[in-house]
Amino acid sequence: MSARTAALDDLLRRATTTDDPQARVPGVVAAVTRADGTLYEGVAGVRSVGDDAPMTVDTVFAGYSITKAVTGTAVMQCVEDGLLDLDAPAAEYLPELDELQVIEGFADDGSQVLRAPSTRITTRMLMLHTAGFGYAFFSEVYGRLLAETGQPDITGATKAALMTPLLFDPGTRWNYGTSMDWAGLVVEAVRGRRLGEVMAERIFAPLGMADTGFTMTPSMAERRATVHMRTPDGTLKPTRAVLPQDPEIQMGGHGLYTTMPDFTRFLRMWLRDGDGEHGRVLRPETVAAAAANGLGELKVGPLATSSPALARSTEFFPGLSKSWAYSFMVNDDPAPTGRSAGSLGWAGLANLYFWIDRSADVAGIWGSQILPFGDPGALSAYLDLETAVYLSLP
């Protein structure tokens, strides 16, 4: 056993066995890769505290927002094939986008105060989260829409759930929300196929991602980790949360199930300039363009919760400038973990975290299944893992 493996194994073990109930995670799978192959795979803990089923490398996770990077890849493939203009109005592909208006508040009777947007949404804006959409757990306005107007929640994976007002004029701000669900529908419109079918053929097959999809196979379902809820005293409670398995909309923003080895193959493709184990996914020049900051002078801000049960207020690398690419966060400056400036990264709601450092040729992912997002135990242990990886590199 190498010193790196021993150190990372110990970090995972401590995260799942600590006496601090606020820091303990039920189970974790973590992996680290370079362009030429996997450096580390480790597991600790259990899939569920309800039955103590042990965590295994091939455990299946609800990926939630790590889905966005895969959808972004499918969008860039459409650009490569000449099917999609990122700067054309996205309503050319999805006319219903032109129906959406900007919400300026609520009238005394609770009705929405709406106006027409000053600019039409483009697919580039969808990729950059500047289109004007939000999430109910990061937006008081969207939270009120769910609570008071009968607006469907996105967890139902319906088209109606996406027909929300815009929080601002498209292109004027960065705001995290349902943009990538719409981007997935753009892919479906220009390909004439469901998003999962496109991903399976054009991304999962060339990467060898056999355990990834919007619908779990029976084998995947048997290996699924339980999503847990952390209560105020730190206790981890198993939930029955499972994303819709025959959804009306295959949600490009949050709908994939995957394993950590599968997603590591996806991360490795970005280190390899678009090349997969069984075929090319993106051209090198597309990878370079997709990995660059696309926000211009705009910046990524903190995520302020409007639903503490689902998400804590969270900011990655507070005090550092952060931008957005297609579709990842970019840290503009070197990060305290060792991550190079210009690296890519993001997360999934149930406390999954990943990064891609193309400069240092290293990427990694931490998989856990805990709500709310930004769990201090999981996030702290992930950052410790990332730091330990950089300390171990030659």
Image (cartoon, grey):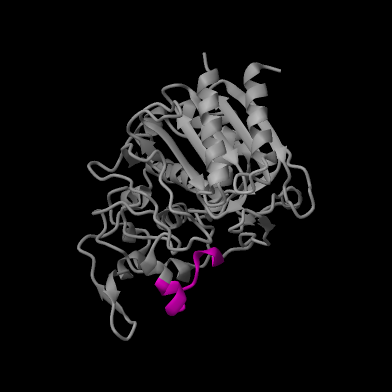
Residue at 70 percent across and 40 percent down: it is 17
Left or right: 30 in relation to 113: right
Residue at 49 percent across and 72 percent down: it is 152
Outermost residue to the bottom: 109
Outermost residue to the left: 118
For residue 210, say whether it is visible: no
Q: Which one is in front, 338 or 260?
A: 338
Left or right: 197 in relation to 98: right
For residue 36, say whether it is visible: yes
Q: Magenta stretch?
A: 144-156
Tag count: 0
Residue 332 image point, x, y percent: 32, 33
Residue 309 image point, x, y percent: 53, 61
Residue at 39 percent across and 63 percent down: it is 139
Q: Which one is in front, 389 or 31?
A: 389
Q: Which one is in front, 181 or 311?
A: 311
Quarter-of-image position of residue 242: bottom right
Q: Which one is in front, 5 or 200?
A: 5
Task: Note whether 90 is above or below 223 in the view shown.
Answer: below
Q: Is residue 285 magenta?
A: no
Left or right: 170 in relation to 342: left
Residue 14 image point, x, y percent: 66, 35
Magenta segment, prevailing SS (helix, strand or loop): helix
Residue 146 image point, x, y percent: 45, 73
